[in-house]
Structures are given as C-alpha cells and as structure tokens.
Amino acid sequence: MVQLYVALEGDLVITQGEIGEEMFIILQGRVEIVINGNQIGQLKKGDFFGEGGLLNGTGRRGASIRCLKMSIFYILEKDSFDSLRGAYPDDCTLFLDVAQRRVNTNKVVKTDDTMSDCDRQKLEEQEEQQLYKQAKRRSLRDVVRTVML
C-alpha cells in the first residue's frame, strides 16, 4: 500500500541505524542525507530514499534523512515493495542499482574526509543520473500507480 506523508522543515524522516520497513518517494520538497552527523548530499522532487533498508538484508538504515523544507512523500511499505519486485523485477533493478551506488558513494565519503559537501553531492548526483539514463524501465510513477490500484 502507498501512503502520503507530510514532514516539516527540520523533521527527521528516517534515522541512521533504525530498522527500515518502507521507502519514500519525494513528491515535493528537499531533504538532506546525513551519515554519522555529516551532511553528504540532498534529494529533491522525484528522488527516493529508504530503499537500502529494504534491500540490504539487515533492514538497517544507512543514513538519516532530514527535511530542509516542508516535503510531501509517497511511502511504499515493504510488503508492497516486495510485491512490486516480484511483478516487475526489471523495473525494481533500478532500486537495487541506486542502493548499491549509494553504498559505494558512502564508502568514498567515509574514507575521504577532505571531500567538500558540494563535491559529495555532485558525485552522488552524477552517479544517479547515469543510472537513470542507463535503466530501461517504466516510469516510477507508473509502478507506484500499479501498487495503488
């Protein structure tokens, strides 16, 4: 099932280390990604987060997400996500690819403290843009609509 969720500026949407039972798709707003107290990037409308907790085997969140301004999200619960993975395995490969790229980017961030926040954000955005260009998939909106029906 997909739900709508509204969070205000400064609200913590997910917390690093907690068990993740859902992922979020940003419909409106902007959030920051925080790992071990350091901002490593930002996400905006059309981006998603929380998939790592559903895919990494432990269910643990790899980062905290805090709203930089009022934001509206779709929340896709684990059961719905698992149903989508079964019904549309090729489409859900995108989530796996993004999750793996984020893990790899986070490893770079953790080992290179000299990288500026701006450079970290650019690196993450470039990697995700490459994924979106390479992926042959239906639009995320179509997949979400399928779950809602």
Image (cartoon, rainbow, N blue to C red):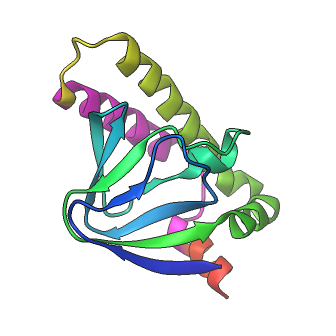
Residue 23, percent from left and from top:
55, 59
Task: Please give left or right for residue 118 compared with residue 56 in the image.
Answer: left
Q: Quadrant of residue 7?
A: bottom left
| Nearer to the camera, 42 or 136 | 42
Q: Is residue 114 magenta?
A: no
Q: Quadrant of residue 99?
A: top right
| Residue found 61% across the figure and 47% down from its top | 53
- Does residue 94 appear anywhere in the picture? no
Residue 120, percent from left and from top:
27, 27
| Residue found 67% across the figure and 88% down from its top | 149
Q: Is residue 131 magenta?
A: yes
| Nearer to the camera, 36 or 148 | 36
Q: Which residues are magenta?
A: 118-141
| Residue found 75% across the figure and 67% down from its top | 79
Task: Please give left or right for residue 124 compared with residue 80 in the image.
Answer: left
- Residue that extends furthest to the bottom in the rendered view of this protein: 149
| Residue found 46% across the figure and 19% down from its top | 107
Q: As displayed, is residue 147 above or below residue 83?
A: below
Residue 134, percent from left and from top:
52, 41
